[in-house]
Image (spheres, rainbow, N blue to C red):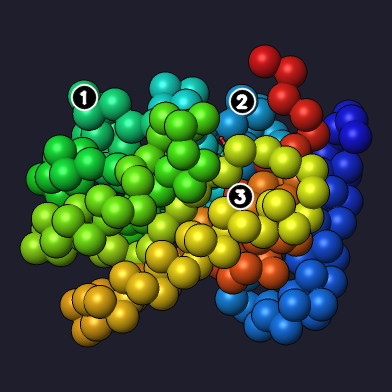
Amino acid sequence: MTVSNDTEIADNLNRVRARVDEACHTWGRDRKDVKILAVSKTKPAHMIHAAADEGQADFGENYLQDALARIGELADRELTWHFIGAIQSNKTRDIANNFQWIHTVASEKVGRRLNDQAPAPINVLVQINVSGEGSKAGIMAAELPRLIETLLPMERLALRGLMAIPEPTANFEAQRQPFRRLRELLEGTRARFGDDLRDFDQLSMGMTADMEAAIAEGATWLRIGTAIFGPRTN
Ligand SMILES: *Cc1c(COP(=O)(O)O)cnc(C)c1O
């Protein structure tokens, strides 16, 4: 897939929407529960304008410096920005001030800094390492209850759910397994914390290559880059 002009962005976005519609139908998901997060990292602002013109409002970024420039360039549009990259604790102020959702919180320290620095409540997802040793990002599932307990009293953090980036695999059933574990972890955590975690209902999982498997297992935020903006060249 190559993206040569902004018409192609619109076409790509509509193809992704059709894939999501179809998978929601297949797996009995309510379409309005499955949202597309357009991952615009490294892409020029005109591509984001093209997607926004097509009705896309949520954008995901994971390189902070690069993202801040783009957020500035697009300040005249009503967009919602999601941070989906690794968080260095000395960068939390810029993240807290520019993003409305943060998908990659994985420590008490980062949570505390975001809570202190956020000008308004921010939506927080905890990143879970669902693939074990191969991946370094995120906490292990067993550490989740303790982290939730430390984050719960932080009033500017709206704890919304879980995020994971499983090891890539081409097989559909194999793709489903880590997504299923993440869903079960979300359900178990909701049951354990009850009313304290009323809005903890979001699952950020699924990318271009595995969005259908993620939908089958309950994804609410699909993080889609390549299928909308074309392959990344850097
Ligand atoms: C780049 C990126 C994506 C998008 O991946 P595609 O395969 O291009 O859809 C999703 N999530 C994260 C965390 C990413 O860094």
Amino acid at circle 2: Thr
Distance between the alpha carbons at the discs numbered 3 and 2: 15 Å
Q: How many marks?
A: 3
Q: Residue furthest top?
A: 234
Single out the mark in the foreground, 3 or 2: 3
Residue 120 visible within the image? no
Give the position of the N terminus as an image quadrant.
Answer: top right
Distance between the alpha carbons at the discs numbered 1 and 3: 25 Å
Residue at the spot x=41%, y=34% of the render? 137
Quarter-of-image position of residue 201? bottom left
x, y (%) of residue 65? 42, 22
Question: Looking at the rendered structure, which numbered label has been put on residue 223?
Answer: 3
Q: Is mark 3 within 8 Å of ligand 1?
A: yes
Q: Earlier in the sequence, mark 1 or mark 3?
A: 1
Is 178 displayed left or right of 189 in the figure? right
Question: Looking at the rendered structure, which numbered label has been put on residue 101?
Answer: none
Circle 2 sits on which residue? 42
Q: Earlier in the sequence, mark 2 or mark 1?
A: 2
Distance between the alpha carbons at the discs numbered 2 and 1: 22 Å
x, y (%) of residue 100? 37, 53
Placement of 182 over or under 89, stated as above or below: below
Towards the viewer: 164 or 42 = 164
Towards the viewer: 159 or 2 = 159
Question: Looking at the rendered structure, which numbered label has been put on residue 90?
Answer: 1
Amino acid at circle 1: Asn
Residue at the spot x=17%, y=56% of the render? 146
Is 176 displayed left or right of 198 in the figure? right
